[in-house]
Image (cartoon, rainbow, N blue to C red):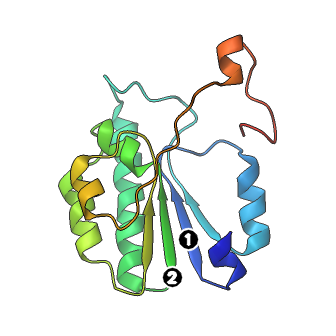
Amino acid sequence: MRAAGHNFKIAIIHFMKIWNYGEVKSLKKLGIDLFRYGTTELIDPKNPSTIDFDQANKTLSKAEELIEKSAYNMLILDEINVAVDFKLIPLKRVVDLLDKKPDNLEVVLTGRNCPEELIERADLVSVIDEIKHPFQKGIEARKGIEF
């Protein structure tokens, strides 16, 4: 939101997220480019399917392409840490991607279980801890709140 307010050229790449989230409509209104990959099925982290590997590879390839083109001020790789944690993409490939990042590009990596190697390379690390969630009470995901 801050970067968009300062007219930064922003792209977000969703790993494993193609559901109809409310933020998809908001991003269009803000002029933020969004690239989405994945399936509508949840991934079994202990037994990912071939399509999960394929989609994660396509997602990372898109990130590599955008970094090479150098057309953005900010690139957000949403849920990339989860893709690494699920072993859908190799950590080394993410490190190599970051090594190619131009100085004028801000790259944001999101998702749980960020590898220590990425934390050590980062300039800023934040953690959001789920303390309580409506799902724990059996409340299904709500439009405009969870999606």
Q: Residue, x 29% and y 55% (percent of image)?
A: 119
From the viewer's side, name the closer residue of 135 and 126.
126
Q: Quadrant of the C terminus?
A: top right
> Where residue 130 appears, x then y in whole percent?
56, 31
Instruction: Identify the mark nearer the N-term, 1 or 2.
Output: 1
Separation of disc 1 and disc 2 at Cα?
A: 7 Å
Residue 90 on image: x %, y %: 22, 49
Residue under pointer 2: 72
**Crowd around label 1: few <14 · some 14–19 · many ≥20 (10 Å):** many
Q: Residue at x 27, y 56 (%)?
A: 118
How far from the left and from the top, in percent, is residue 117?
Answer: 21, 53
SS category of the residue bearing label 2: loop
Q: Quadrant of residue 32?
A: bottom right
Disc 1 target residue: 11
* Left/right of residue 1 with respect to residue 45 in the rendered view: right
28 over 36 or under it: above or below: below
Q: Is residue 90 visible?
A: no
Image vertical order of residue 17 relative to residue 120, above or below? above
Q: Is residue 46 visible?
A: yes
For label 2, count other residues whose C-alpha is less than 10 Å away and answer few (under 14), some (14-19) or many (20+). some
- Where disc 1 sits, the SS reads strand
Compared with 94, 116 (above or below) is above
What type is the residue that disc 1 sits on? Ala
The reply to whether callout 1 and callout 2 are in contact (CB within 8 Å) is: yes
Q: Residue 64 shows which numbered tag?
A: none
Name the quadrant containing residue 88. top left
